[in-house]
């Protein structure tokens, strides 16, 4: 196998015997043994052998699968439940033998397959870290050097010293991924396990996978999340009933798979009416600002300040920078009805709420910014009000509330929200009223300010990550 090939799969098939009834499990080997009493090639032997085979049929979980993964390349495996994805990964990982064909692997493999696989349920998390690291080829001293970073990434607290049989599925996945991704593998195999993690941990995992890819690690990735496969994988293989229905560039293969899923669901985008689009005076992708004083009689402000800040404060330190002259003390979304929500509708007017504080006080021009990214870290949409020219006034030790109203014409899925606030001197505007960003100061920039879901909207014909409303003019030639 070429040194440039990390994984080579050649004509791999995996067959399982399906018995006609429970007694057939006993009858078939007995009849087959009787056939061997006759010499090879004898008609009687052949007839008895055929009788032995009549007690079962072969079910092919995989049939003649072939593809290669080059070093540093990422390949996604997609398909419906039961199509053979997990079976294929187990064969590549070496935990299952193929019936026919061959698999060759070049380099250290780290595989995140079924939750808890490779863990001894009676061992503590700490003991399992050392056990798994040893299986992956690390010495005791190497694991000692990596243990603190593994424990910090898993972030399961004191449970690291409890038996893993007491862990939830999310805790199992956290520890398994932390171990497998820390051994600097040449090949990383991930089988849908990240789907049980919460949004912040998924985001952290995707960032780790991205870093491994940049370091030259080959990745084999199974997921039902087509957006993830498109974002992470250059190539894709679509399995259907154990066979390769299509393989090639991930954009092409994922598109074909999605169209097939829609046909199976009986959905025809051309014939079924789309739901009404949310009406709003706010143009898509733009922002409008509103500020609130902190008057105790203002019920909106009172409700905002009473909100629990634990969720925001848990994630904000993950990626934060700025001089904190003005700090974002809390950040969340309101839907078009004014209710706090982490689930928003496509193209619905959304309100991003910034609760700002300042230890020393601030008086002057400012701008808040909003950026939405996929869970894989791909930036999709930025919103700001570039010409509002408003002043922010915060007394020392006080707070102010700013609302950025915008629309989010994004495809259904989970997104990471970045929130920032920038300060400007009074003379930092061009003649057209826009701000000169070369003169701005980043007061607070929070990379994981909130996690939101855009609810599914069928029959809209949205294929790109962002759907921008447009105007079409038809004229004669």
Image: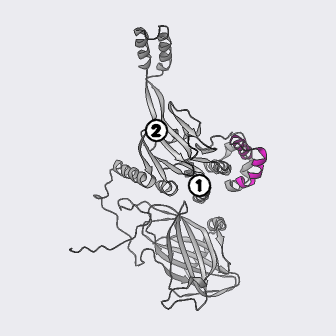
x%, y% of residue 60?
44, 32
Rendered residue at 48%/14% (across/down): 32
> Is 213 placed above or below 26 here?
below
Q: Is residue 305 above or below residue 130?
A: below
> What SS does tag 2 mark?
strand
- The residue stretch that appears in magenta: 122-151
Q: Position of residue 209 (x, y in %)?
A: 59, 55
Q: CA distance from mark 2 to mark 1?
A: 25 Å
- Quadrant that contains the C terminus: bottom left
Q: Nearer the viewer, residue 46 or 422?
A: 46
Classify mark 1: helix, strand or loop.
helix
138 is within the stretch colored magenta: yes
Q: Nearer the viewer, residue 216 or 46?
A: 216
Count of residue discs: 2
The N terminus sits in image quarter: top right
- From the image, give the main secondary structure of the stretch colored magenta: helix
Q: Is residue 237 left or right of residue 163?
A: left
Q: Which residue is mark 1?
A: 213
Tell me where residue 176 appears, x and y as whole percent: 65, 47
Residue at numbered disc 2: 65
> Which residue lies at the image location 46% right of the left edge and 70% below the top edge?
408
Res. 295 in view:
no
């Amino acid at each position: 196998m070429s040194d440039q090939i990390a994984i080579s799969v050649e004509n791999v098939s995996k067959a399982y015997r399906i018995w006609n009834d429970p007694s057939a499990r006993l009858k078939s080997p007995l009849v087959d043994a009787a056939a061997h009493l006759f010499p090879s090639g004898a008609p009687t032997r052949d007839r008895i052998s055929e009788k032995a085979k009549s007690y079962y049929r072969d079910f092919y979980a995989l049939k003649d699968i072939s593809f290669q993964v080059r070093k540093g390349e990422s390949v996604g495996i997609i398909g419906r439940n039961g199509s053979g994805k997990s079976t294929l990964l187990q064969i590549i990982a070496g935990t299952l033998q193929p019936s026919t064909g061959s698999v060759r692997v070049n380099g250290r493999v780290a595989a995140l397959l079924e939750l808890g696989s490779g863990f001894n349920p009676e061992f503590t998390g700490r003991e399992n870290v050392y056990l798994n690291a040893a299986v992956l080829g690390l010495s005791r001293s190497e694991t000692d050097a990596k243990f603190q970073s593994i424990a910090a990434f898993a972030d399961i607290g004191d449970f690291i010293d409890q038996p893993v049989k007491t862990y939830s599925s999310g805790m199992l996945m956290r520890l398994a991924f932390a171990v497998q991704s820390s051994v600097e593998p040449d090949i990383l195999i991930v089988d849908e396990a990240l789907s049980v993690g919460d949004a912040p941990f998924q985001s952290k995992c995707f960032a780790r996978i991205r870093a491994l890819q940049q370091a030259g690690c080959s990745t084999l990735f199974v997921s039902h999340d087509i957006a993830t496969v498109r974002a992470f994988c250059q190539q894709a293989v679509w399995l259907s009933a154990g066979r390769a229905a299509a393989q090639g560039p991930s954009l092409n293969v994922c598109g074909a798979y999605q169209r097939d899923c829609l046909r199976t669901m009986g959905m025809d985008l051309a014939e079924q009416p789309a739901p009404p689009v949310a009406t709003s005076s706010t143009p898509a992708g733009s922002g409008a600002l509103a500020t609130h004083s902190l008057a105790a009689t203002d019920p909106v402000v009172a409700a905002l300040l009473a909100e629990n800040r634990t969720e925001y404060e848990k994630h904000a330190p993950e990626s934060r920078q700025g001089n904190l002259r003005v700090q974002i003390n809390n950040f969340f979304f309101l839907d078009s009805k004014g209710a706090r929500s982490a689930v928003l509708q496509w193209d619905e007017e959304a309100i991003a709420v910034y609760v700002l504080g300042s230890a020393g006080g601030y008086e002057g021009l400012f701008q808040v910014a909003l950026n939405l990214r996929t869970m894989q870290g791909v930036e999709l949409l930025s919103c700001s009000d570039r010409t509002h020219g408003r002043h922010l006034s915060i007394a020392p030790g006080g707070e102010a509330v700013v609302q950025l109203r915008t629309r989010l014409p994004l495809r259904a899925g989970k997104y990471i929200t970045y929130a920032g606030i920038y300060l400007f001197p009074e003379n930092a505007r061009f003649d057209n009223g826009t701000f000169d960003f070369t003169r701005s100061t980043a007061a607070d920039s929070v990379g994981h300010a909130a996690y939101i879901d855009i609810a599914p909207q069928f029959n809209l014909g949205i294929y790109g990550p962002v759907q921008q409303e447009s105007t079409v003019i038809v004229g004669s030639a």
